[in-house]
Amino acid sequence: MRFSSTVTLQYDTIFSAFSHGDFLKGLDWLKESGLDSAEICISNYNGVDVEKIKDELDKRGLGCSTLSTGQARGLEGLSLIGVPADVTKKTQERFMQHIDAAAVLGSKVTIGLMRGLGSQATEKQDLKDLSEAMKPLIDYASKKGVTLLLEAINRYETALLNSAESTLDFIKGDLGDPDCVGILWDLFHANIEDIGYGRSIERMGKKLQHIHIADSNRMFPGYGHTDFAAILKAVKDTGYTEYCSFECLNLPSLETVLKETGPWVQQMRKL
C-alpha cells in the first residue's frame, strides 16, 4: 500500500496544504513526510510542461498517483453530460489531454464531478448518456495504458454513482467492465453512502484502484469518527497495492496536516 497527497499546479484548492505558487514546496513536503507520490490537480494544459513535472517528481524520488481533474468543472463548466454537445466534446478532449499526461507520469486519471451532476428524475438517461460520453475516453485510455478512476461521490454533490456499489454496477453493466476503468473510493463519501466498509471492499474487489483519505467530517484522519486502521487493514488484506491519497480539508488546522501526515502514514504502513 502506497501513500500520496493532493498538490495543485495552477489554481488553489481546499484539498492542498500548499498554494499553486508553492507547488515545488509541496513536492518537497511530500518527500520529507515519507509519502510515495503526489496526486496532482491540473485544470488545463495551457503552458504546462508535463515532462518538467516528471523531472521534478523524479528528482525527489516521487511518483504521481493520479491526476485530479475536477477544477475545470467550476472554472470552465466542463461536463460529460447535461451540457451542449460542444461542451461534451471539449470535456472529452480535456480528458484525453489528462490521459496523455498520465501516460507520461505513470499515473491514473480521476473522473469525479466533471462527469456531470445528473438528477434523480433523469438518472436512467443520465447514466446512458455518461456511458456514451465515456466510450471514446475508454478507447483512448486503453490504447495509452492508462486507468480511469470513476469516483463514488455522495448524493449531496451529485445524483449519479453515489456509492461504491452503484459505481461498480455502472462499470460492469453500462460500461461493459473495461479493464482500464476502476473505482476511486473516497472514505468521506463512503461514510455517507455505503452500507458498510467491509461490504464495499468485498464487492469492489480488484476494481478498487484508488482510495481518498479524509475523516467523516472531511478533516484530517483522527478528528472525526472513521476507523482508518480497521478499514485500511481490511483493504491491505485483499492484496491491495495501489494508493491511499489524502484529500482532506486543512482542518482542524494547516499546522496539523503538515505535522501529522508523516507520523500517521508511518502508523498505517505497520498494519
Image (cartoon, rainbow, N blue to C red):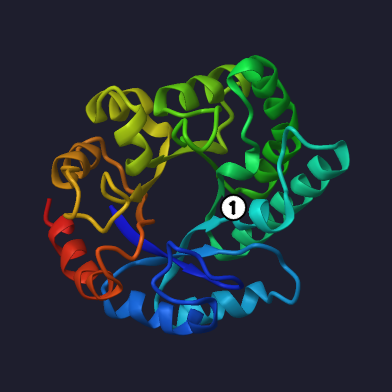
Q: Quadrant of residue 207?
A: top left
- Quick one: 46 or 179, which is closer to the camera? 46
Answer with the quarter of the image where residue 250 lies: bottom left
Name the residue: 54% across, 56% down. Answer: 68
Question: What residue is shown with label 1?
Answer: 70
Q: Is residue 30 toward the left or the right of residue 253 in the image?
A: right
Please name whichever residue, 140 or 171, is drawn nearer the observer in this view of the structure.
171
Q: Amino acid at mark 1?
A: Gly
- Residue shown at the point (88%, 43%) measured from the top left: 86
Q: Position of residue 200 (x, y in %)?
A: 31, 27
Left/right of residue 232 with respect to residue 200 in the rendered view: left
Depth order, front residue of 71/140? 71
Residue 31 place in picture, x, y as percent? 33, 77
Q: Measuring 14% from the left and 40% from the top, which residue is drawn there? A: 230
Q: Residues within 10 Å of mark 1 (few under 14, many from 20)?
A: some
Q: With respect to residue 248, does 143 lie above or below?
A: above
Q: Residue at x 51, y 28 (%)?
A: 161
Q: Position of residue 110 (x, y in %)?
A: 55, 48
Q: Is residue 99 above or below residue 192?
A: below
Which of 145 and 250 lies nearest the eye of the viewer?
250
Image position, residue 95 (x, y; %): 69, 50
Q: Secondary structure at mark 1?
A: loop
Count of numbered labels shown in the rendering: 1
80, above or below 162, in the image: below
Quarter holding residue 192: top left
